[in-house]
Amino acid sequence: MIELSTTKRVILGNEAIAFGALSAGVSIAAGYPGTPSTEIIETLMAYGKIYTEWSANEKVAFETAYGAAINGAFALTTMKHVGLNVAADPLMSSSYTGVEGALVIVSADDPSMWSSQNEQDNRYYGLHALIPVIEPYDPQSAHDLTIEAFKLSNKVKHPVILRSTTRIGHIRGPVELKPPSRPILGKLIKDPKRYVLVPENARRNRVEQLKRWEKIEEEVEGLNGLIDNDSENLIIASGISFGYVIDAMKELDIKANVLRLSTPVPIPKRLFLKAVSNSKRVLIVEEGEPIVEYQIKDLLYDQGIRVELHGKDLVSRVGEMTLDKVYYAFSKFFGLDLVTEYLEVPQDIPPRPPALCPGCPHRSSFTDLKKAITMASFKPNETFISGDIGCYTLGLLPPFDTQDSSTDMGSSIGIANGVYRATGNIPIAVIGDSTFFHSGISALANAVYTQTPMLVIVLDNRSTAMTGQQPSPSKEIDIGEVAKGLGVKYVKYVDPFDVNSSIKELSNALKWVRENKQPAVVIAKRACALLVMDNVEENNLPKAIVDLEKCTGCSICYDYFTCPAIIPRKDKKAEIDNYTCIGCGACIPVCPFKAISLKGNKPEKWDELWLG
């Protein structure tokens, strides 16, 4: 349990958001793990004094917080940027109904796509849904503006989006923490004319929504700031761009007025008009899309104000903001003789592709699957393998080559449906356990309903592993029983480390799908290696060893199986790195010459940790 004080700490921006929520009086918090948002809920869980949950998906997380807020509670929901797409339906409706307590929605955006499939700018959701967007620029402002977000939401009775980014959430900085407040819970409110969005009620709510928006436009004025340096040049910066602008101005000794925007949606109109009244030239520095720029241009046109204005003509829309990008914009805007280019990775650094961890069961699942495809007389180059979002997306890489698509959570089964309808070829859908409960169930129901022949492989490692081993519903709910309940007639379980049995079961499943023209489900059950390692003493692990007399240097173990603990010698024979090996034994059945074995005793409950 975390104990908080008012002393200054060096913490993550995500931790600062969590502590800010506690100071504001949050009582209900729900989210779905997704980088770069995960640490917010983890911090609140560690605090342990309010209700916090990892929900099945972002829509459920949003609705949990929304349900609390419409009954007067102070509620928080967190998700990464693409997660807000999943929650977009209740998001739009929440703007119509408003809330009674406070509802803060953290959207953790990922410019440059460090761990995401796109870099969408969720400030657009603020414009689209008429929900104010508050954007911090460092960990301290993340803490303080979270408090302000709750205050604003409660005052205007409207949801508020707190838009963070990877660079804000994952940097550490000194933060003066304000003490936690008493959690504000609600009481039962029954107001169907407001919260039941049949057309008659929604039309009335629409009018109230616009009234609240006018009030919001007034309230945000005080959340922004103007630095007046008595200049005819005005720089407008939102979010982390403000920090880069200040640093660049100091480094280059530039004199300009600076309008710091903490609310890029809506912009503070009165403060901007005051700032622009003595300006001849304006530069807008914002990360991502021209959200602020569009609003500024619209306001200038309405007011009949003509100034020289620059924004995305000088600041790239691609990737996250960097100091180098600000230097480039300043060089053009101020006519400086700067030699600067966008930062590039030096060409002499060898590439280091991501790899599955030592002991990862997905590695065995992929090698088993490739053999099963051939054993079932399927042609690998005519078998579409539809992947999903998770660690197992690394099946894309050689030597596995077992992901032909991966676009969004739960997409594997839905895309497989389309592949079969378009080509007539029986596809394979690969999905994780957490992702199955996130949004795979509805797609599987559709496959049963439409009688789509496909093999669905659920890689059940009992955790949401990619984001830090958060718990998965599969620890409490049997995936096979869920599949049977949906009407799947062929359901089997395999242990991917039991190679011969796993290959046989996968092959039989493919044959069954081909013969019966219906979906089949195979659950590959073995725990995430990191989850197992958290429960054992590392110095008591068995280790794999190679009998060099039996090893022929065939390279199957390190080129085909590719466990990071197995490395080639100069003579092409294999050896095991004792520091990396965790003694899982997955490599033993891979060797056709039986040259690999385990040395040492298994820890207590070793097999139970992997398979229990």
Image (tube, grey):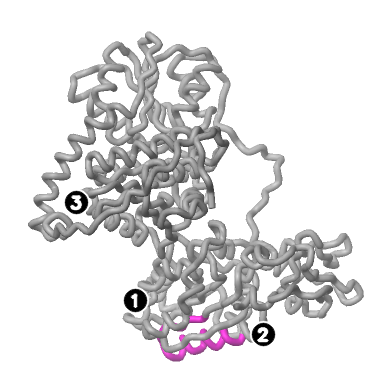
Question: What are the residue bounds of the magenta stretch?
Answer: 504-522
Task: For mark 1, give the secondary structure.
Answer: helix
The circle on residue 500 is 2
Q: Which is nearer the N-term, disc 1 or disc 3?
A: 3
The circle on residue 446 is 1
Amino acid type, label 2: Asn
Q: Can you see residue 89?
A: no
- Residue in front for this viewpoint, 335 or 190: 190
Amino acid type, label 3: Thr
At horizontal 53% and vertical 42% (from top left) the residue drawn is: 170
Where residue 15 appears, as percent x and y from the top left, is 50, 44
Task: For mark 3, give the secondary structure.
Answer: helix
Foreground disc of the pair 1, 3: 3
* Disc 1 residue crowd, few under 14, some 14–19, many 20+, Cα 10 Å: some
Which residue has dot 3 on it? 97
Where residue 307 appears, as percent x and y from the top left, is 29, 17
- Residue found at the very far front of the displayed protein: 182
